[in-house]
Image (cartoon, helix red, strand yellow):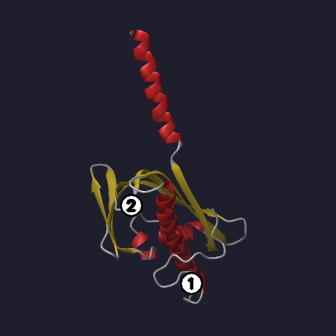
């Protein structure tokens, strides 16, 4: 009986580990002009997403105890609640608490680094998650589209600050257009 219990526990642990190991990942990169600290100052606040993501109408940040949350209201009326899990000078990590996306166990990181070209930055946005109520491909496409639109919006902010005009914008009205330096 004891061996049977140990075998069942081992089997359960194996299934739990394999479910985590099969998490989906989306990682996107976009390059833009500027210096990391200067560009991050424009886009890196947890609620600054409303200033650069074309789908976000509003962002409200609130603190509950020591935990920081943001509630994002989309232009179509949808809402996300996200929890800040880590932050440093040029990055932050968060997880989705509630959203209309077909995902669960969503954890993401947004960060900026100096690019290998002078006076350029590289934005990175990465998430790990499981599909929930949709196929893996559908869930991955939704997250990829969100990342592409947001990264184009951040690049627009950097371009406008660097060039002083809107002529160098990469996103079309509504955002999300993939530009030539979109990288996985």
Label 2 packing within 10 angstroms: few (<14), some (14-19), many (20+): some
Residue extending furthest toward the front:
135
Between the residue at mark 2 and the residue at mark 1, the CA separation in whole angstroms equals: 27 Å
Residue at x 48%, y 40% (from the top left corner): 19
Percent position of residue 49, x then y: 42, 69
Percent position of residue 45, x then y: 43, 65
Q: Relative to residue 120, is residue 128 drawn left or right?
A: left
Q: Which residue is mark 2?
A: 101
Instruction: Please name whichever residue, 8 or 116, is drawn nearer the observer in this view of the structure.
Output: 8
Percent position of residue 21, x then y: 53, 41
In the picture, the quarter occupied by the C terminus is bottom right
Label 1 packing within 10 angstroms: few (<14), some (14-19), many (20+): some
Which type of secondary structure does the marked residue at label 1 adopt? loop
Q: Is residue 89 visible?
A: no
Q: Is residue 31 visible?
A: yes
Which type of secondary structure does the marked residue at label 2 adopt? loop
Residue extending furthest toward the left:
64
Which quadrant would residue 58 be assigned to in this image?
bottom left
Q: Is residue 33 above or below residue 23?
A: below
Could you tell which of marks 2 and 1 lies nearer the N-terminus?
Answer: 2
Q: Is residue 55 above or below residue 110?
A: below
Q: Relative to residue 84, is residue 18 drawn left or right?
A: right
Q: Which residue is mark 1?
A: 169
Mark count: 2
Which quadrant would residue 36 be assigned to in this image?
bottom right
Q: Nearer the viewer, mark 2 or mark 1?
A: 2
Q: Relative to residue 123, is residue 116 drawn left or right?
A: right
Instruction: Please name whichever residue, 138 or 35, is drawn nearer the observer in this view of the structure.
Output: 138
Percent position of residue 15, x then y: 47, 33
């Amino acid at each position: 009986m004891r061996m049977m219990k140990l075998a069942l526990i081992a089997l359960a642990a194996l299934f739990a580990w394999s479910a985590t190991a099969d998490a989906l990942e989306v990682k996107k990169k976009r390059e833009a002009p500027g210096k990391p600290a200067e560009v991050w100052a424009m886009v890196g606040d947890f609620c600054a997403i409303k200033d650069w993501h074309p789908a976000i109408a509003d962002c409200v940040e609130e603190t509950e105890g020591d935990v920081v949350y943001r509630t994002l209201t989309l232009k179509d009326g949808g809402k996300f609640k996200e929890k800040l899990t880590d932050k440093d000078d040029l990055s932050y990590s968060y997880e989705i608490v509630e959203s209309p996306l077909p995902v669960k166990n969503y954890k993401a990181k947004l960060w900026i680094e100096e690019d290998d070209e002078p006076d350029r930055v590289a934005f990175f946005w990465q998430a790990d998650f499981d599909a929930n109520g949709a196929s893996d491909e559908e869930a991955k496409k939704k997250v990829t589209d969100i990342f592409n639109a947001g990264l184009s919006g951040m690049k627009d902010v950097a371009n406008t600050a660097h060039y002083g005009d809107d002529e160098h914008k990469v996103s079309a009205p509504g955002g999300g257009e993939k530009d030539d330096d979109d990288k996985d």
